[in-house]
Amino acid sequence: MAGDQLNVLNALDVAKTQWYHFTAIIIAGMGFFTDAYDLFCISLVTKLLGRIYYHVDGSVKPGTLPPNVSAAVNGVAFCGTLAGQLFFGWLGDKLGRKKVYGMTLMVMVLCSIASGLSFGSTPKTVMTTLCFFRFWLGFGIGGDYPLSATIMSEYANKKTRGAFIAAVFAMQGFGILTGGIFAIIVSAAFEAKFPSPAYQVDALASTVPQADYVWRIILMVGALPAAMTYYSRSKMPETARYTALVAKDAKLAASNMSKVLQVEIEAEQQKSEDKSNSFGLFSKEFMKRHGLHLLGTTSTWFLLDIAFYSQNLFQKDIFSAIGWIPPAQTMNAIQEVFKIARAQTLIALCSTVPGYWFTVAFIDVIGRFAIQMMGFFFMTIFMFALAIPYDHWTHKENRIGFVAMYSLTFFFANFGPNATTFVVPAEIFPARFRSTCHGISAASGKLGAMVGAFGFLYLAQSPDKNKTEHGYPPGIGVKNSLIVLGVVNLLGMVFTLLVPESKGKSLEEMSGENEQNDEVSSTNNNNSNNTVPSA
């Protein structure tokens, strides 16, 4: 119980919010800022890549990436992220959070730069090298998920822990926003310096040679925020919970946290090894205690990301419908980058960023469970409201209503399961499995992201093969795809029932580590009584 908790851990749980908390949010959050910038900036330049490398002479429309190339360029980072979440999550429990934290950042810095330097003289070689570096960029980004969440949860006090972890995740919104703003600045500068006619006026001249620098600059700048926080990460002490509970050095944990909290913490003798607490990951005992929790965190993150990343299906239609992005042939290559970046920036500003910070404000007030259940509930309602009368929304006069409901769907994703699925796995598992279990949960989410981003891209194609996009087989149509997504969100509500509420509780209380210590102490006392020799 709480009475059996180490002094250093209790000091962290009851510590008042102070400067080091905000420092930790900034250091961990800048990693997520970079993650979001790097993952989402590729969507700003894929149209430009199509114009530069896949131009077809005589075509009435600008060149576009073939479906398989588009899927590879957009999706390869997801594959790398999934692998990185599993590998670095496991490594964070084996070597410690601090040692691994710097590795992920260096991978991100090097691969961001290398992505922009993708080389070759043919489309195939440029796309191949871009995909290679994007995979390893994703690998580094993947490591940031479990490590940032775990470090923040282990540094935070129990009163505001949810808000602190959610604030780290909310930096994603600023990363997406900054990516859009920077792309606007770069494209505006190049358009002013190298003006060119629209595609329909002069197809070849509409893509100036200097446009090849635009996408490279946008991708490479993602290295800057990561590089700027590397020194700060290297100076962060190892978390007290890893040092005390995994490395078994309570004295070092007390010493480190005394400096961080700027209070005197009494160094304790390390408690004896708890035999009942030595079960392995996926052992029978682990599955008995935490199996349903892991099922809950992996399934809800998987289902959430299917719905969340399916938004890519409808963005281009929505942007075109409300006039944010004119037909491609009416613009030159750099103007198209500008218009796409402007549209994504407005979406981030109006829907994505506010949703994240609503979660930060309310997660320690109404709890993780309530926010996640509410988010899935409203996503279900809005998906069905879009799907069932879908033909009604296709009429021009009703498109603003469609956009409003679409935006609300993703507002409640961010003020809902998109944030809570990141927070909860960092709170409910034992310290020695915390990073690994968060990595497994996050990897499950990325698997869902691939289904949402690419599975539904094929699924949403028209059943009429004459109306499908070039290169795609017939699907079930947008209306039926939206109904499927509504069902996915409904399942998210069901699996949320497996996720425990961690609001206001210590990490050891949630993971059961303190209770196990008490049980062992009691068992040892009983055993010592039983071993008294009888007369």
Image (cartoon, grey):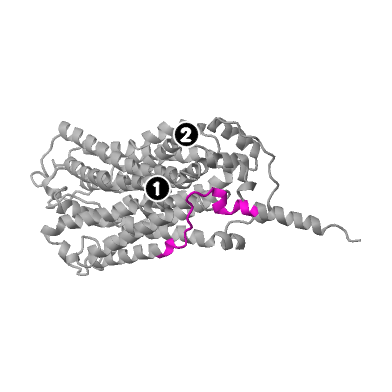
Give how far across and how far down residue 330 sits, in percent.
11, 47
Residue 322, compared with residue 23, is above or below; it is: below
Give, as a three-letter code, the residue at label 2.
Gln
Q: Is residue 474 visible?
A: no
Is disc 2 surrounded by few (<14), some (14 to 19) or many (20+) residues within 10 Å?
few
The disc placed on residue 135 is: 1
Describe the element under mark 2 as helix, strand or loop: loop
Task: Name the residue that disc number 2 marks.
Answer: 18
Give the total of numbered labels: 2
Q: Is residue 275 magenta?
A: no
- Work out how far the residue at label 2 is from the one at label 1, CA to CA, in angstroms: 38 Å
Residue in the picture at 66% in, 53% down: 518
For residue 76, which numbered disc appears in the image? none
- In the image, is 307 to the left or to the right of 423? left
Report whether 201 appears left or right of 237: left
Q: Which residues, given as a range, are shown in magenta? A: 494-516
